[in-house]
DNA sequence: ATGAAAGCGCTAACAT
DNA sequence: ATGTTAGCGCTTTCAT
């Protein structure tokens, strides 16, 4: 059968509590000699603590939930962006000896349920909409600390880690404007007066200093292809598209090319995230990069801070973004136009050539 | 405080056991009237069972582990292929009311530890090497049922779900041979006399009916690029490459193009897996497809079968594969050679013969 | 059809 | 520096 604390205690001729203290590193209360003896026996017998028992007896489970949206009970298609984060979260949590419960959420009520069922110490909410988060937290979360990634739904029980989406939008506009683009399409999922997409739009719009068409589309490759195909017909004068996700941008680019539109010579395309994917496609995708590992690390640090040191709920964190120029963006009018503006194509990476060239508005 | 069984019992004027039976659907032992009364109170009070307590008292936890390799304690970079599977596994398990513990494994001992610490009912091992699995299972796994995905390490305690890798290799060779390719390079991670890669190689080699060069490279985009760049120099006469993973093939293709080699006109490239990625690149990637959702569903079905019905350890399952032809493979000698069959093309410089792609240069 | 007792493996709060 | 006493919330086993 299972090796228990009691077994160790008997074998060592001490009480269970002493063993418990040794196991949990409460060495202050035990003599060096017994510590060593117990540790030897633990190894010898191959003792593994029961987390269920600990979770039941103590107020903590050393387990945190990573909760992701599950469209319906039928699917859990994790977005490439969330995928990257989950891996990093697991790694950060494991380093700190926390285990991870991975859970798709189909109905709002499932959040509170998951938290209480396993007596989770904390939870990371990944990519939920602001209004969903409000719903979750309305249903009292008890003692579980919560951090929301990629959400602007600040409220008494939820802090967040997010990218500086507003600045990301600004940088995108700055880049496109610098290349001479004025007539631009903003493509992303439908948004209202808040949330990640809204922030990006605000920043983009403000920096652009002009109106821009908005295309509400799903964040998928296929939706992008569809938009790319009809872009010329519906926005004949547009010279650039800014998509709120790389996967969408890549689809748009493919749709454009399929329709015979040259990228970036006729239409420039930008994405957001800087997934590995951006380097795989042709032209390579210009995008706004966010530091995913840091995002995960920050989320975990915030969570653990609250859990272990019972720190005051920290401020929500906003991480920096930066522009990554690749091949999918170029000066208005195409390479030719860029060159007549005075730049000598020297063998530098495509896309960077035009930046200084078209500088004047 | 927490709502417990006891609270429900008191409120309903019955014993805890009756409530417990209702909660667990043991309706045979309770009258219809009390069932309804109890269910009403459960909802009213918002009762959520404690999984820790249940796991402790019962012999089951209704939790299964999804264990993935973690190169070192520092990283958990889940491969795109495993990522897709994890999402599907979670979905299948959630449908059956099992929770998922996601755990990166850095040291062999961590497997047994994870299983026992949480009293897991089962575990899915994802993408471990055959020899690693042997190590895990050597350290007795107790009552926990285990299924290994993508492994050939059959042994008394581990069944597996795998792709028909041998046939996959055969199909690849058949396709390339049909296009006239004879001088071909096999690219994949180093392999010995067993395992996924070995199977693919065996099938490939046998169908090809000729010797072929083997390039041992890591399964990454960058390693692929590197190989692509030097392919012409090191294998001047080769007309095709078969890579054991899409991501690798995509890198190879990029490296080739970068070196001025046209794909597929001068060199054809094939991958394995059929990730979404294959449709995003140009030319689109010909590959061997495996049904990932089915793979996950099968793994879960096997696991649950063992857990719940205590079925005899089933046979390991081998899933079908099929060829998906896209733009990265073509007849030896290039489109020109193919055109003798009747097709006239624009003879464009870039190798953009992919589906729907129009020459953009 | 329902209940009482015992304990799963552990830890918190006090002893000593 | 170590031991004792009570549970944590649930299920099992055996009554009734």
Image (cartoon, coloured by chain):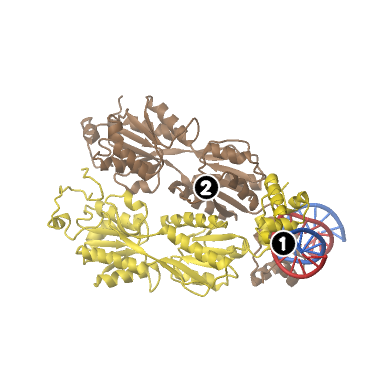
Chain colours: A brown, B yellow, C blue, D red
Q: Which mark is residue A68?
A: 2
Q: Is residue B359 visible?
A: yes
Q: Which residue is mark 1?
A: A20
- Which secondary structure lies at badge 2? strand
Q: Which circle's residue, 1 or 2, is located before the other in the chain?
A: 1
Q: Residues within 10 Å of mark 2 (few under 14, many from 20)?
A: many
Q: Is residue B76 among the parts visible in the rendering?
A: no
Q: Is residue B194 left or right of residue A22?
A: left
Q: Are marks 1 and 2 in contact (CB under 8 Å)?
A: no
Closer to viewer: mark 1 or mark 2: 2
- How far across and down, in percent of the image, does residue D3 sit? 82, 65
Foreground residue among B266 and B334: B334
Q: Quadrant of the C terminus of chain A?
A: top left
Tag 1 subunit: A
Tell me if B231 is positioned left or right of B7 in this view: left
Residue A9, percent across and down?
Answer: 74, 68
Q: Is residue A35 above or below residue A173?
A: below
**Along the viewing direction, whichever of A276 and A356 lies nearer the viewer:** A276
Question: Which quadrant, please, contains the N terminus of chain A?
Answer: bottom right
* Residue displayed at 33% across by 62% down: B322
Q: Nearer the viewer, residue B151 or B128?
A: B151
Which quarter of the picture shows residue B289?
Answer: bottom left
Find residue A80 and report its horizontal and vertical position in percent.
43, 48
Q: Is residue B137 left or right of residue B270?
A: right
Q: Chain of mark 2?
A: A
Q: Secondary structure at mark 1?
A: helix
Q: Residue at x 22, y 50 (%)?
A: B353
Query: Marks 1 and 2, Cα distance to the nearest angstrom?
Result: 35 Å
- How dense is the environment of label 1, judged by Cα within 10 Å: few (below 14), some, or many (20 and up)? some
């Amino acid at each position: 059968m299972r090796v228990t604390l009691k077994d160790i205690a008997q074998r060592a001729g001490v009480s269970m509590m002493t063993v418990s203290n040794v196991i949990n590193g409460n060495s202050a209360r035990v003599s060096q000699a017994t510590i060593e003896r117990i540790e030897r026996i633990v190894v010898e017998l191959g003792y593994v603590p029961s987390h269920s028992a600990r979770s039941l007896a103590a107020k903590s489970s050393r387990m945190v939930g990573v909760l992701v949206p599950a469209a319906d009970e039928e699917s859990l298609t994790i977005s490439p962006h969330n995928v990257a984060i989950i891996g990093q979260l697991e790694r950060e949590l494991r380093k700190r000896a926390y285990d991870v419960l991975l859970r798709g959420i189909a109905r709002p009520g499932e959040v509170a349920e998951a938290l209480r069922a396993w007596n989770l110490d904390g939870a990371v909410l990944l990519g939920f909409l602001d209004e969903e988060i409000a719903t979750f937290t309305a249903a009292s979360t008890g003692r579980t600390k919560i951090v929301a990634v990629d959400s602007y739904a600040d409220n008494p029980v939820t802090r967040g880690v997010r990218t500086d989406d507003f600045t990301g939008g600004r940088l995108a506009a700055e880049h496109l404007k610098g290349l001479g683009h004025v007539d631009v399409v903003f493509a992303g999922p439908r948004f209202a007066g808040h949330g990640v997409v809204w922030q990006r739009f605000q920043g983009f719009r403000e920096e652009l200093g002009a109106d821009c068409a908005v295309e509400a589309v799903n964040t998928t490759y296929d939706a992008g292809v569809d938009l790319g195909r009809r872009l010329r017909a519906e926005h004949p004068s547009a010279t650039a598209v800014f998509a709120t996700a790389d996967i969408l941008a890549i689809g748009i680019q493919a749709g454009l090319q399929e329709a015979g539109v040259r990228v970036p010579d006729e239409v420039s395309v930008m994405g957001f995230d800087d997934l590995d994917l951006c380097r795989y496609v042709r032209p390579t995708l210009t995008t706004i990069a966010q530091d995913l590992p840091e995002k995960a690390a920050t989320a975990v640090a915030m969570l653990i801070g609250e859990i272990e040191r019972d720190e005051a709920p920290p401020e929500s964190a906003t991480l920096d973004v930066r522009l990554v120029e690749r091949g999918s963006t170029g000066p208005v009018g195409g390479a030719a136009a860029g060159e007549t503006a005075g730049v000598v194509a020297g063998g530098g990476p495509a896309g960077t050539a035009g930046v200084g060239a078209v500088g004047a508005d």
